[in-house]
């Protein structure tokens, strides 16, 4: 993020940056307004950054793979691609180019609603301006073809040689303060810390030895994801231990998710408030909040930072790692690490990319970016310098896939979901904040003025929104800032929960739900007097 | 190194490198030069003239915030002429507006008060005009007191060039000039997003945080550096607390250029942490008994969790248990849950909300 003003052109898509990563949104604004960086925004809404974009393309939700590949179609046709980079650093060109043939400007216009003239302008600007960076967030990934969308971004960067130098790259903006760290630490079904695969016997042996376990006791199969664990509740999954998560609010198709959770034999929730999920738990364990503990956190740029303890936890609340160690001890594990220091030492020992990051160094520095293999290593701000981690970068042929659900006669509008500036995720923290709740006390549905007129809905009126999965009541925000045919609902508000409506269709690889596209209808609420 | 220069400040020889201002060199070496309009994060403005220094060989006094430090310079920061001038600046500000410190939120943390203290001003020379302008308390987070404003312009520059929200500006003319939001709307009705950057850089009590009002003077608060718990930017925050309660947040000013947020915050990082003080925080373990969650001891709760996990594992295998770790807890805690799931229970069913 420090490198935003080193780009010549920035492509923003699937991120409402000034609301969801506001400080970084400001840095992009500064780069554009004061450093002359060009900006392309692709979003169906007039998000804050759209105002200063050189080009704002409003795509139909679910068409990202099409316009991304369409840009590449135009780039290759016009010979704007970086042949040297493609030759030296990538493979898969032939299949890839063949797959581009489908994405003619006309076809892309039909799918995405972006005119072929505008797409050409964007392709020209992006390909010829110099160093280009892509920033995206959940608007790219939360689709039943989210992985294809990410691959399409990476293809675009590879054919332009936009890798390995400051101001380039594919840069996902992480939505939670330590989502990077949770991944780095192996909070994923397929890898130990440092992305060492569980399917690899050497990796399993390394961790088994360090933990004093027998190799044959280690699970050698990739585990289930959050979404599949909920889907398999009552079947293959009997008990859940949920630390600081609120799936009852954050999961798609909430009514179904609730029904699934009720099938479990045993749910433990460890949290700071009695969240919607804690309310259905068998055991609730009170945990310390972020300012009540110390340790390390890894931000979206892989920057590992040290956070200090400012307060004591309330009442009998305990630190998460202390609770985990207590349960481990009771289950017969005698040497489970009990302190932050012991855990950190073990992480550094077993995770090469974190080996050089000591608490002492972090206390003196504003963070270190991994890989940082030794105590002398300065950290690594830019990845993929000399080569990609898999060696040659793979140019991936991408077959167009539509979203799982499209508008129908009964549900004629497309619903997309996201966050507001003032609230955060399921609202368990921000909705308990006086100022934030004061500014934004309730949810709303953003609906285009023309759609609202057709439905005879006025700004500020209560409406009923339904999808094939359920319905909610919410206040209408009638605006020109959203494309016709599309409505937007933030998912923070339990009393008008967007996730009652969302579709639980998953990406086949990443198992990420399709929060960004489902069909719905909006109706005026007629009061019977 | 040809970059090296040496200069003399108040008789003391100082070695430094080229490219800094006299003010920066002086402050690095603990010389007191006040500034009202200059702030490290909003840059020089050349308005307040509080930072004037005398350069030997030059007739006029120079603004140190805008003066490049050169080799061989001889600088004086506290000649009688400079002290007289500073005193005059403070006197003028004190006479213009309502600078009564007694219950001001910035008492003890005010750059104008500091200047008055250094100048030894007990009672201002000029007659004091009384407060004439109404407070603006229309916004959720910030109180604007135009009577305390010294029109230094820091807030205007911060709003337009740091956080880029482009809300604040100077409006009206000459004696009526003041800082306005949009086209002179109350802050709460303007396009202001309440990031609070303006209040952070304000040198006086013209812009203060509503949530901190009356809770404690600056010197009664503790400051701790924490990393924000909201989005993935990882902003560094100086969190102010008192009696184990959260009071307010500032973006970390120390080494701000290297911080990921460069000293800035958004509305959530600024005002979104009062949930820490809530009475409805979970304070004791709860166990469901006869369909209701009831308070329990830690031993009871932990024993139950351990035995239930062991039962499920014995009956259905380790793969019947699933673990949701959290993108909100530290690396050490995530690792601990990971080690527990894989090393103690023996399952790879572990994930977190990266997908949600």
Image (tube, coloured by chain):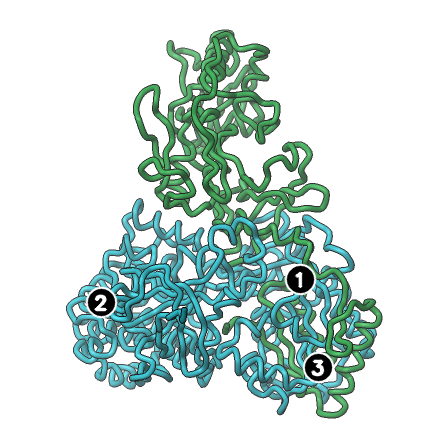
Chain colours: A cyan, B green
The span from disc 2 to disc 3 (Cα, nearest Å) is 53 Å
Mark 2 packing: few (<14 Cα in 10 Å), some, or many (20+)? Answer: many
Within the image, what quadrant is residue A124 found in?
bottom left
Disc 1: host chain: A
Give the mark nearest the N terminus, 2 or 3. 2
Would you say B338 lies left or right of A197 here? Answer: right
Residue at 37% across, 34% down: B180
Task: Where is residue A126? Give x, y as percent.
Answer: 25, 63
Residue at 72% across, 55% down: A313
Q: Are marks 2 and 1 in contact (CB under 8 Å)?
A: no
Label 2 sits on a secondary structure element that is helix
The span from disc 2 to disc 1 (Cα, nearest Å) is 47 Å
Viewer-side residue, B45 vs A166: B45
Q: Report which residue position mark 1 lands on.
A: A272
Task: Where is residue B157? Give x, y as percent.
Answer: 38, 36
Disc 3: host chain: A
Residue B53 in sight from this viewpoint: no
Disc 2: host chain: A
Task: Where is residue A267? Give x, y as percent.
Answer: 68, 78
Label 1 sits on a secondary structure element that is loop
Q: Are marks 1 and 3 in contact (CB under 8 Å)?
A: no
Give the mark nearest the N terminus, 2 or 1. 2
Relative height, residue A391 to residue B101 (above, below): below
Task: Where is residue B264? Give x, y as percent.
Answer: 48, 45
Q: Report which residue position mark 2 lands on.
A: A123
The span from disc 1 to disc 3 (Cα, nearest Å) is 20 Å
Within the image, what quadrant is residue A327 found in?
bottom right
Residue at 44% across, 56% down: A421
Q: Which mark is residue A266?
A: 3
Same chain shared by disc 2 and disc 1: yes
Q: Which mark is residue B113?
A: none
Would you say B30 lies left or right of B45 here? Answer: right
């Amino acid at each position: 993020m420090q490198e935003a003003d080193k780009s010549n052109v920035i492509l923003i898509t699937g991120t409402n940056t000034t609301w969801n990563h506001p400080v970084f949104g400001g840095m992009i604004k500064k780069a554009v307004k004061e450093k002359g960086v060009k900006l392309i925004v692709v979003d169906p809404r007039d998000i804050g950054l759209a105002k200063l974009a050189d080009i704002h393309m409003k795509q139909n939700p679910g068409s990202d793979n099409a316009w991304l590949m369409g840009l590449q179609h135009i780039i290759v046709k016009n010979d704007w691609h970086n042949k040297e980079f493609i030759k030296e650093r990538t493979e898969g060109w032939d299949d890839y180019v063949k797959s581009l043939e489908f994405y003619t400007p006309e076809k892309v216009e039909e799918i995405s609603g972006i005119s072929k003239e505008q797409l050409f302008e964007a392709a020209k600007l992006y390909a010829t301006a110099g160093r280009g960076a892509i920033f995206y967030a959940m608007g790219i990934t939360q689709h039943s073809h989210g992985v294809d969308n990410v691959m399409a971004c990476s293809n675009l960067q590879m054919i332009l040689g936009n890798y390995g130098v400051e101001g380039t790259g594919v840069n996902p903006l992480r939505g939670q303060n330590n989502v990077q760290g949770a991944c780095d630490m192996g909070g994923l079904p397929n890898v130990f810390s440092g992305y060492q695969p569980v399917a690899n016997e050497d990796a399993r042996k390394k961790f088994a030895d360090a933990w004093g376990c027998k190799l044959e006791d280690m699970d050698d199969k990739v585990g289930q994801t959050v979404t599949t664990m909920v889907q398999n509740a009552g079947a293959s999954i009997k008990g859940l231990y949920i630390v600081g998560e609120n799936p009852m609010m954050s999961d798609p198709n909430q009514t179904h998710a609730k029904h699934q959770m009720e099938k479990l034999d045993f749910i433990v929730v460890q949290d700071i408030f009695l969240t919607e999920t804690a309310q259905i738990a068998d055991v609730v364990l009170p945990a310390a909040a972020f300012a009540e503990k110390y340790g390390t956190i890894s931000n979206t740029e892989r920057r590992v930072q040290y956070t200090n303890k400012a307060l004591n936890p309330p009442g009998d609340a305990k630190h998460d790692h202390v609770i985990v160690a207590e349960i481990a001890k009771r289950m017969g594990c005698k040497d489970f690490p009990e302190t932050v220091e012991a855990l950190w030492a073990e992480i550094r020992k077993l995770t090469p990319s974190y080996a050089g990051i000591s608490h002492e160094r972090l206390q003196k520095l504003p963070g270190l970016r991994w890989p940082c293999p030794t105590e002398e290593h300065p950290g690594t701000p830019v990845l993929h310098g000399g080569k990609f981690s898999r060696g040659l970068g793979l140019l991936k042929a991408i077959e167009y896939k539509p979203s799982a659900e499209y508008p129908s006669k009964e549900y004629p509008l497309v619903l997309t979901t996201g966050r507001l500036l003032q609230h955060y995720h399921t609202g368990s923290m921000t909705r308990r904040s006086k100022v934030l709740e004061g500014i934004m006390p309730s949810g709303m549905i953003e609906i285009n003025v023309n759609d609202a007129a057709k439905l005879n809905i006025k700004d500020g009126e209560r409406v009923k929104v339904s999808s094939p999965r359920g319905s909610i009541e919410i206040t209408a925000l009638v605006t020109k800032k959203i494309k016709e045919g599309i409505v937007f609902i933030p998912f923070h508000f339990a009393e008008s929960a967007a996730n009652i409506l969302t579709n639980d269709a998953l990406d086949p690889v990443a198992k990420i739900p399709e929060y960004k596209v489902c069909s719905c209808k909006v109706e005026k609420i007629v009061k019977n007097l | 190194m040809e970059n090296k220069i040496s200069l003399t400040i108040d008789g003391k020889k100082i070695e430094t490198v080229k490219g800094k201002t006299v003010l920066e060199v002086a402050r690095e070496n603990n010389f007191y030069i006040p500034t009202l309009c200059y702030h490290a994060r909003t840059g020089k403005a050349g308005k307040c003239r509080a930072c004037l220094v005398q350069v030997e060989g030059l007739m006029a006094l120079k603004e140190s915030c805008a003066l490049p430090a050169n080799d061989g310079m001889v600088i004086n920061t506290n000649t009688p002429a400079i002290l007289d001038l500073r005193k005059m600046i403070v006197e003028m500000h004190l006479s213009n507006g309502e600078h009564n410190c007694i219950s001001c939120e910035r008492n003890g943390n005010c750059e104008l008060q500091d200047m008055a203290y250094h100048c030894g001003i007990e009672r201002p020379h000029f007659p004091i005009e009384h407060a004439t302008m109404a407070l603006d308390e229309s916004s959720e987070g910030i109180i604007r007191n135009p009577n305390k404003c010294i029109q230094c312009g820091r807030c205007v520059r911060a709003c337009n060039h740091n956080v880029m929200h482009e809300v604040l500006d100077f409006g009206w003319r000459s004696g009526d000039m003041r800082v306005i939001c949009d086209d002179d709307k109350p802050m709460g009705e303007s396009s202001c997003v309440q990031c609070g950057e303006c209040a952070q850089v304000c040198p006086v009590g013209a812009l203060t945080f509503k949530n901190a009002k009356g809770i404690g003077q600056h010197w009664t608060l503790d400051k701790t550096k924490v990393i924000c718990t909201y989005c993935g930017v990882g902003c560094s925050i100086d969190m102010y607390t008192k009696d184990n309660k959260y009071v307010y947040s500032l973006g970390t000013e120390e080494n701000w250029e290297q911080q990921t947020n460069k000293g800035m915050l958004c509305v959530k990082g600024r005002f979104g942490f009062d949930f820490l003080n809530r009475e409805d925080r979970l304070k004791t373990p709860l166990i469901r008994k006869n369909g209701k969650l009831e308070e329990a001891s830690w031993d009871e709760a932990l024993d139950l969790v351990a035995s239930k996990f062991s039962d499920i594992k014995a009956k259905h295998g380790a793969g019947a248990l699933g673990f949701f770790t959290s993108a909100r807890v530290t690396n050490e805690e995530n690792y601990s849950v990971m080690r527990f799931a894989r090393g103690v229970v023996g399952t790879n069913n572990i994930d977190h909300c990266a997908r949600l």
